[in-house]
Amino acid sequence: MSAMIDLLNLSFEELSAFVRDDLGQPPFRARQIWKWLWAKRAVSFADMSDLSLQLRASLEEKARIARPEIASVQKSKDGTIKFLLRLEDGETVESVLIPSESREGKGRVTQCLSCQVGCAMGCTFCSTGSMGFSRNMSMGEILGQVLVAQDYLEKHQENAALRNLVFMGMGEPLLNLRELMRALHALNNEQGLSFSPRRITVSTCGLEKGLRELGESGLAYLAVSLHAPNQELRSQIMPKAARWPLEEMMRALRAYPLKTRERLTFEYLLLGGVNDSLRDAAELAKLMAHIKGKLNLILYNPAEGSPYAAPSPQAVLAFEKYLWNKNITATIRKSKGQDINAACGQLKAAASAAGPGFQGA
């Protein structure tokens, strides 16, 4: 692998230092290059037309733009798109584009981002967890997913815009805190990708380390994968996440820094016959009673070899109704991309995983 500097993996401050110290250029050149990388999505230095030929030559000699490569694209019948992306070292990750319609009839797209190759948490219902953990992704690799998605939409779906980002793909974001925070700072930069914190959600299994730092940064909204109404069940289905006792986690979340009108989002995956009974709903209502939050109820998407089943429609509706009767805001989140294994908990990067809807890169 080349030892040249990957510019996509530099914060604006780091890029400014590189431009000053390695290239001997004034500060405004860093602003120009940053804009080319993130706002104009340049794929080569030759694209950077307002830079001198000499500067472009210096960049060619000392730096590179290392974007993820699209290994395959799968399209769902519901419009969901899943990318299998190959990183520089040959590792692969998946990223998903989820469509929705705006009131104006224009397509709005949410991208589900990965932050690790695999995952170390080992949640028993999650396909990514069955992969094990390979490594953390860098800031450049995380944000490269966004550049790939924007280019793809511009080429294939001109009426669609990438509006929201959710760190709900492969990996546990708080276990890659340094690169996560660097990526969030870059996303918020108005001269680059320019995503408002209101458009970014970071989802965690519930880890103590890094939670306060994320909250105090104000760079993204928080979603917590709950999936169990008590410590005993959480220990069974999310054994590593449950090392932080549920009662302590909820206490910390009650003190989590929130902006005006902001609420925490809790994700609750309904597993048939496991956590979807009215008794479970009653425990969950008590757990949620004194916290500023809302619940996303997610129907389990069965994966090959999984010990779990989807909940029955009757159980889902009864569960939701019970929560509403207890004044708990709960919404059944419509699952998309099941036919291409792109729904919640189904991501599992492998070149051999291409199935229905597969297209070459």
Image: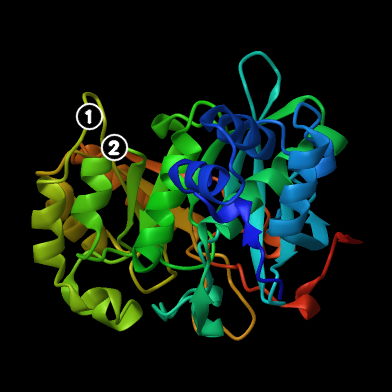
Measured as percent of width and height from the top left, residue 102 is found at 62, 21
Measured as percent of width and height from the top left, residue 225 is found at 34, 59
Q: Is residue 71 left or right of 113 when viewed as pictured? A: right
What residue sits right under mark 2 in the picture?
218
Measured as percent of width and height from the top left, residue 287 is found at 14, 55
Marks 1 and 2, how far apart at CA = 8 Å
Confirm whether residue 60 shows in the render. yes
Q: Residue at x 25, y 80 (%)?
A: 235
Eye-nearest disc, 1 or 2: 2
SS of the residue at dot 1?
A: loop
Q: Residue at x 50, y 62 (%)?
A: 115
Whichever of callouts 1 and 2 sits on the residue coming sooner in the sequence is: 2
Viewer-side residue, 47 vs 225: 47
Q: Which residue is drawn at 74% across and 40% down?
A: 55
The colouring scheme, among rainbow, by chain, secondary structure or one colour, is rainbow
Viewer-side residue, 93 vs 230: 93
Quadrant hosting residue 131: bottom right
What amino acid does circle 1 point to?
Lys
Rendered view: 48 above or below 121: above
What amino acid does circle 2 point to?
Gly
Please identify the quadrant where the C terminus is shown.
Answer: bottom right
Q: Is residue 309 left or right of 104 when viewed as pictured? A: left
SS of the residue at dot 2?
A: loop
Q: Are the two marked residues, 1 and 2, in contact with CB atoms closer than 8 angstroms?
A: yes
Q: Residue at x 9, y 46 (%)?
A: 255
Quadrant hosting residue 220: top left
Please identify the residue farthest to the front as the structure is shown. 24
Measured as percent of width and height from the top left, residue 196 is found at 45, 29
What residue sits right under mark 1 in the picture?
259
